Structures are given as structure tokens and as C-alpha cells.
Image (cartoon, helix red, strand yellow):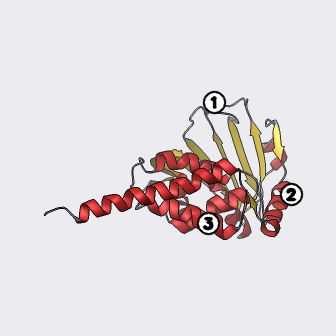
């Protein structure tokens, strides 16, 4: 299935609006999904997986604490990262003023792949960033590195790393005004997806349309339709009740 950027953004926007969440902006999340899909990293699949849980998540603000001058700890209460990351990153950049680096510990969250577009924005502003997390399924370990001015990350994956992190619902993001040593940080990862490959996929998507698995597109459209119909029926019933 080939769709336009506008079609994809509109479909995700409608699906998220139908969830009637207080936290998270539909247009921002829709662009997060589209950005990830355009570089071939399955944004629609990640959103479809998230949609099974988002409507059951706690709909509350994240707890953000500056635990040390260069360390921010965030509790997302097992919510989707997509609903909170833009606000968290704005806070981190504000607190980073005058510092050379900042680390952000994101706890009790899911949909970490959707951090992609927010990290790309930072790199474009001259802030290097590195993000890594552990999954319960393959690939078990993922790391993005975006040095200053990069338009796409160096992406590293591995199913076996000699690390102690077994928390499958956390993520570490490190920001710096200096570039990260990609070779040193990635030496234990078995798979490397080059930033040029991601950039080429994005350019192809802009010129030829965005490729989406047929079943994933159908699922996305069904999610949007089903949620809107359900909410509409509830609204009608509510409107007819006697006070």
C-alpha cells in the first residue's frame, strides 16, 4: 500500500482523537508516526500496537524531577512516550541552559520507537542526542545516535548485550553540545542501520509515497473508525439520559 503523507497523518490524527485523551496532541503524534514510517522503521505498526493499550493507560501528566543538576527522572505511569515526550524534551532543553550535557531517565513507558522525530529535531538545533532502551522481544536492545546537524540517526540493534539493564519499560536519553563517539558506544551492537539508508528511505517516501503494509494500513483505518463510532454511540446515549 502506498499512501501520501497527508493521508497517513490524517488517519493517525483521527485514530488518536477518537481515543479522547487529555495528554498528547493528535497532530504531533501523527507526525511522529509518519516520520518513523517514512524512514522504514514501521511507525504505523508501532502505533497500531500502542492503540491496543493507549485507551486503557492512565491519562495523567508525567512526573518530571530534576534529581541532579544534569539528570532528569521521569515517571510516565506506563503511558505512551508519544503522549509526553515533546513536553519532556522542552523541559530538558530549558534545564540544560548553561550545561554541556543532560541525561533523561524515562521510566514506566512504552512506544519508545516513536521518540525518533523529537530526537531528529534536537540534532537539527545543534544538540547531539543518544537514546537507548531494552525490549522484552527482539531486537532486545536498541540505540539511536544523532550527532549535531544529522538528519537521521545511526541505528544499532542487538539481541545480546553485556549490560545489566533488564527494565523493559524504561529509556535513557542523553543530550550533549558535543558529538558522541559513535564507534565506541556501538561496539557491542551486532546490527547497524546507517543514517544514509534511513535518509534515502525518507527521500523516496517524499517523492514516491509512503509504503505501508496492507494489513497494517487496514488495522489503522479500522481503529480510527471503530473508536469514532463507539464514542459517537456513547455520546448519543448520554445525550438521551434523564438528569
Number of the front mark, 2 or 3: 3
Quick one: SS at disc 3?
helix
Of mark 2 and mark 3, the one earlier in the sequence is 3
Q: Position of residue 61 (x, y in %)?
A: 41, 57
Judged left or right of residue 74, residue 4 is: right
Q: From this viewpoint, is residue 188 visible?
A: yes
Mark seen at residue 119? none
Of mark 3 and mark 1, the one earlier in the sequence is 3
Judged left or right of residue 189, residue 37 is: left
Residue position marked by numbered label 1 in the rendering: 164
Q: Position of residue 10 (x, y in %)?
A: 58, 67
Q: Residues within 10 Å of mark 2 (few under 14, many from 20)?
A: few
Judged left or right of residue 69, residue 60 is: left
Q: CA distance from mark 2 to mark 3?
A: 24 Å
Quick one: SS at disc 2?
helix
Q: CA distance from mark 1 to mark 2?
A: 31 Å
Of mark 1 and mark 2, the one earlier in the sequence is 1
- Residue 130, compared with residue 204, is above or below; it is above
In front of the other: 71 or 85: 85
Q: CA distance from mark 3 to mark 1?
A: 38 Å
Residue 82 occupies which quadrant of the picture?
A: bottom right
Mark seen at residue 196? 2
Q: Position of residue 195 (x, y in %)?
A: 83, 55
- Residue extending furthest left? 243
- Residue 124, compared with residue 60, is above or below; it is below
In front of the other: 23 or 121: 23
Number of the front mark, 1 or 2: 2
Residue 161 occupies which quadrant of the picture?
A: top right
- Residue 33, compared with residue 54, is above or below; it is below
Mark seen at residue 9? 3
Amino acid at each position: 500500500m502506498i499512501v501520501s503523507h497527508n493521508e497517513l497523518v490524517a488517519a493517525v490524527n483521527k485514530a488518536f482523537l477518537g481515543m479522547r485523551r487529555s495528554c498528547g496532541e493528535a497532530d504531533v503524534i501523527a507526525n511522529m508516526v509518519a516520520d518513523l514510517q517514512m524512514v522504514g522503521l514501521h511507525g504505523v505498526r508501532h502505533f497500531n500496537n500502542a492503540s491496543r493499550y493507549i485507551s486503557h493507560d492512565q491519562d495523567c501528566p508525567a512526573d518530571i524531577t530534576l534529581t541532579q543538576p544534569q539528570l532528569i527522572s521521569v515517571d510516565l505511569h506506563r503511558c505512551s512516550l508519544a503522549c509526553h515526550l515533546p513536553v519532556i524534551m522542552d523541559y530538558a532543553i530549558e534545564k540544560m541552559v548553561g550545561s554541556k550535557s543532560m541525561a533523561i531517565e524515562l521510566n514506566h513507558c512504552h512506544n519508545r520507537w516513536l521518540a525518533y522525530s523529537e530526537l531528529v529535531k534536537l540534532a537539527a538545533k545543534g544538540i547531539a542526542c543518544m537514546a537507548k532502551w531494552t525490549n522484552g522481544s527482539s531486537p532486545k536492545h536498541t540505540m539511536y545516535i544523532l550527532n549535531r546537524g544529522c538528519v537521521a540517526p545511526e541505528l544499532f540493534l542487538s539481541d545480546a548485550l553485556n549490560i545489566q539493564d533488564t527494565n523493559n519499560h524504561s529509556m535513557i536519553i542523553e543530550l550533549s553540545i558535543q558529538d558522541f563517539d559513535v564507534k565506541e558506544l556501538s561496539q557491542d551492537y551486532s546490527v547497524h542501520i546507517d543514517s544514509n539508508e534511513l535518509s534515502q528511505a525518507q527521500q523516496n517516501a517524499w517523492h514516491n509515497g509512503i509504503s505501508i503494509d496492507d494489513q497494517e494500513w487496514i488495522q489503522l483505518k479500522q481503529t480510527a473508525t471503530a473508536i469514532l463510532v463507539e464514542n459517537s454511540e456513547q455520546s448519543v446515549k448520554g445525550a438521551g439520559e434523564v438528569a
